[in-house]
Amino acid sequence: MINLFEVEETNQMVEESNLDVRTITMGISLLDCCHEDVDETCRRIYDKITSKAENLVKVGHEIELDYGIPIVNKRISVTPAALIGGCCRTTDDFVKIAKTLDRAAHTVGINFLGGFSALVSKGMTRADRLLIESIPEALAQTELVCSSINVGSTRTGIDMDAVRILGEVVKKTAELTKDQDSLGCAKLVIFCNAPDDNPFMAGAFHGVTEGDCVINVGVSGPGVVKRALESVRGRDFGVLCETVKKTAFKVTRVGQLVAREASRRLDVPFGIVDLSLAPTPAIGDSVAEILEEMGLEKVGAPGTTAALAMLNDSVKKGGIMASSYVGGLSGAFIPVSEDQGMIDSVECGALTIEKLEAMTCVCSVGLDMIAIPGNVSAASISGMIADEMAIGMINQKTTAVRLIPVAGKDVGDVVEFGGLLGHAPVMKVNTFGCEDFIARGGRIPAPIHSFKN
């Protein structure tokens, strides 16, 4: 139970430090919606989502009012669509499924729906390939649907055929949504070691290891951590780590409370709390500012990777003590466009894509929400994806790529995405090519340390 002192402390974190529950995400299995006819499959998908999630938004608002804790997003994740798309014969059939998902999301009033996805770390089925090829049209013709493709894992290696195709898919998605500054790419994530229970978009999907329906909650709180570190400015690393751990414990307790309450009111099993530090463009809600509070002049300076590693580890240690069911990604996100401190560091020249890549070795995700010139080749995008997948595969961790080659924009331009997606300076990409490397195809084998049976 949470006592009166913790309630007062939580209220203070909400009022002064931007504490919020970033999302309540309902995971829904669509495996029982499969049918040989695509129209019947779509009907079943729509009916199941709208019935299961009928009260999700309403309950979220009620919990906000009852506890005074902001819940920024109410979302849904579904079974990877490729697994229920055996009836699809063309890419248009998968676009039809995407439109059905979008219509259901609008009906229940959520912010985003994730799961237009495929899991292809070892190879692609016909349905997987069709779904991947349908992504540009699907994201251009929907508003709330998010897509993710898992192309690698520590146990299986990296499917480089999928990586090659996805470079082309990212380019085409950017072109089809160029009137929105290529916003479609912000709804597409490419993963290595994707978790089955991630509540955060755009990478959420309801994994095949999950039950029929589940509630996952994602908490945030970069502002809370930064404020706590201000009180120990100049102290040694031991004190710094303990401060982050204690703060992460408190933040995760809030997420646990909301998750349990949502589970009870919706009569849906509680899954996990994801205790990731997810920034927003709001002032004071930045992971970059936490790192700078540790003593860095700007994110990207020498010591940045060490500081991020320490932050990530301390957040996880504190969160694990607060809940027996921690999952998802859980750690620190470093999306460029969604973090004002990251944006500032890019604009002043302190932070480059190469430094961001190094930082992804120790954080929760990868190259996230990075705007790049629209003329970057599909092969170069595939190469950047392959680099991140290799980091995840070798280090036995989740990595991801969400690149936005903004049509008609070049280095130095600024792209406005709006809302939680923020804005981003277009970053410089290495101009040397990797076409021959990407064209090889096949699969990069799993590393030697994957063999643990």
Image (cartoon, grey):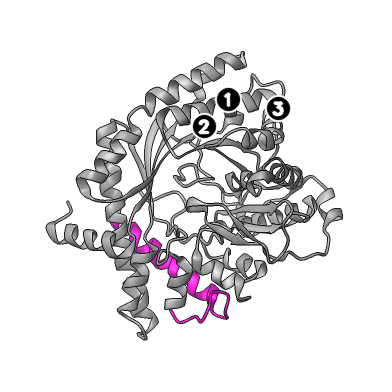
Q: Which residue is at the far right? A: 436
Rendering coords of residue 146 (x, y %): 55, 40
For mark 1, what is the residue? 84
Label located before the other in sequence (3 or 1): 1
Residue highlighted by disc 3: 91
* Residue nearest the observer in this picture, 180 or 243: 180
Disc 3, SS:
helix
Q: Main secondary structure of the magenta part?
A: helix
Tell me what residue is drawn at x 61 percent, y 17 percent: 38
Q: Dot 2: what SS?
A: loop
Farthest residue, direction left: 4
Q: Amino acid at mark 3?
A: Thr
Q: Is residue 365 visible?
A: yes
The reply to whether callout 2 and callout 3 are in contact (CB within 8 Å) is: no
- Residue indicated by mark 2: 79
Q: Height in image: 73 above or below 416?
A: above
Residue at x-position 48% and y-position 22%? 46
Query: Which amino acid, by three-letter code, is at mark 2?
Result: Thr
Q: Nearer the viewer, residue 31 or 403?
A: 403
- Identify the residue at horizontal 71%, vertical 65% (top origin): 411
Q: How packed is label 1: few (under 14 Cα within 10 Å), some, or many (20 or more)?
A: many
**Whether label 2 touches label 1, CB < 8 Å:** yes
Q: Whole-Å distance between the Cαs marked 2 and 1? A: 8 Å
Q: Give how far apart the Cα atoms at labels 3 and 1 are.
A: 14 Å
Q: Kindly identify the amino acid type of the residue bearing the numbered disc 1.
A: Ile
Residue in the image at 64% along x and 22% along y: 86
Mark toward the start of the polypeptide (2 vs 1): 2
